[in-house]
Amino acid sequence: MPTIQMDPATRDALAMLAGGHVREAIAALELILCQRPGDADALLGLARAQIAAQRPELAEPLLKRLLVAHPGHREGRSHLSLLRVHHGDPSALHDLQELSDAPGAGFLEHYNLGTALLELEDLAGAEAATLKALAAEPDHPTGHARMGEIALQRGDLRAAAEHFRWMVAALPGEPVGWMLLAQANALAGEEERALRTLEAALEQLPGSQALLECLHGLAMRAGAGRRALRAAADLWELDPESADAAYRLGSAALVAGHIVQARDAFLVAVKIAPGQWMARRGLAKVCAALGELDRAAEELEKALELCPGQADVVNDLAALWLRRSVPARVEPVLRRALKAYPEEPRLHLNMAVALAMLGREREALPHAELAAGSEDAEISEPAARLRSQLRRRAA
């Protein structure tokens, strides 16, 4: 725990961390430790900050330094024991349980035990430990985030949303709470509410890359092309040299039906990152839609060179060649892809079509039968029709 007479600079840095300003807190605490290497509060605070930043390897030596000076420091021992759980130390869970059971144990001792139990897929144990943590500090946003995570795993989406709403209210300036709340809404089938949640978050945190990426992804999944397009345009404005932003813009424009805009964005993405196969696949799609079939084939072939056997690219290329009535070019590419993805139904459908066009109905039939078993109606229905035709010809 922090000392009674904490240095004011350390107190300010820890306040930054509590407010979710992890990067700023790390910079301030590192400066403090340069000046006062033995400051226990700064050591612990920097370890917490590195853990929050998903850099446990940087937290571990700080905790060891803390425990050399203060061997009985409970929170330091708890954090280090949790890191030992990550490393697979079988005795670490016992130590975490002992620290949680000790008189006077606080939020973090219980919370770290819950984290370890959740990693070990003990959902009931993780929930019990997290509830003990919240009993110690009922307003702790991290505790509510964990309870929301547990509720999601249980499938209790309403409870998850309640915990994430509490987290948003406690830390409105942190994107993660908004994104978790939107995720819970989307999983509950409330896609419009999820989109509005992220749009409300962006009113408070304009220009947040994490929120914009989350909004773009959700809008794309929901088929909300215009909203995805706005989010992608904002991302590109943040970083015009980003191939990812250009790709997102192209994908959103394609969903929104703005083919020329999609083509321009994919061209930029390919120019910035010529080794990015997904951008080339996107460019091929819009070229095909614009009737530029030679350019579409060229881009798909380049994409296959970058990612040999990638099933989606192979299927796009197969569809293009079948559209141009060149089944002989399809067969060898499909055979290579089927070795890597023997259960992929669209590959089987395209192979059945290609072989049928080549007059090899008997070879085509098994592929049509496999494709007809797909749960995707866009694959199973044409495959079933082709299967019937092939059976009639064979009779």
Image (cartoon, grey):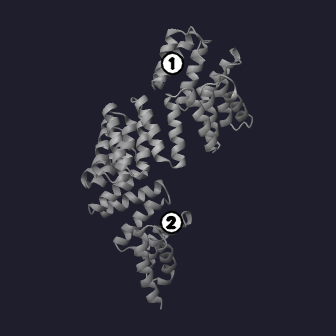
**Quarter occupied by residue 342:** bottom right
**Quarter occupied by residue 93:** top right
Q: Is residue 101 visible?
A: yes
Taking the spot 61% from the left edge, 25% from the top edge, the residue there is 106
Looking at the image, residue 54 sits to the left or right of residue 177; the answer is: right
Q: Residues within 10 Å of mark 2 (few under 14, many from 20)?
A: some
Could you tell me how far apart the alpha carbons at marks 2 and 1 are, in whole angstroms?
52 Å
Q: Residues within 10 Å of mark 1 (few under 14, many from 20)?
A: many
Name the spot of residue 226 as percent of width and height, x first: 27, 49
In front: 227, or 123? 123
The mark closer to the camera, 2 or 1, is 1
Q: Which residue is mark 1?
A: 14
Q: Secondary structure at mark 2?
A: loop
Which numbered disc flags the more N-terminal residue, 2 or 1? 1
Taking the spot 54% from the left edge, 32% from the top edge, the residue there is 54
Q: Which residue is mark 2?
A: 344
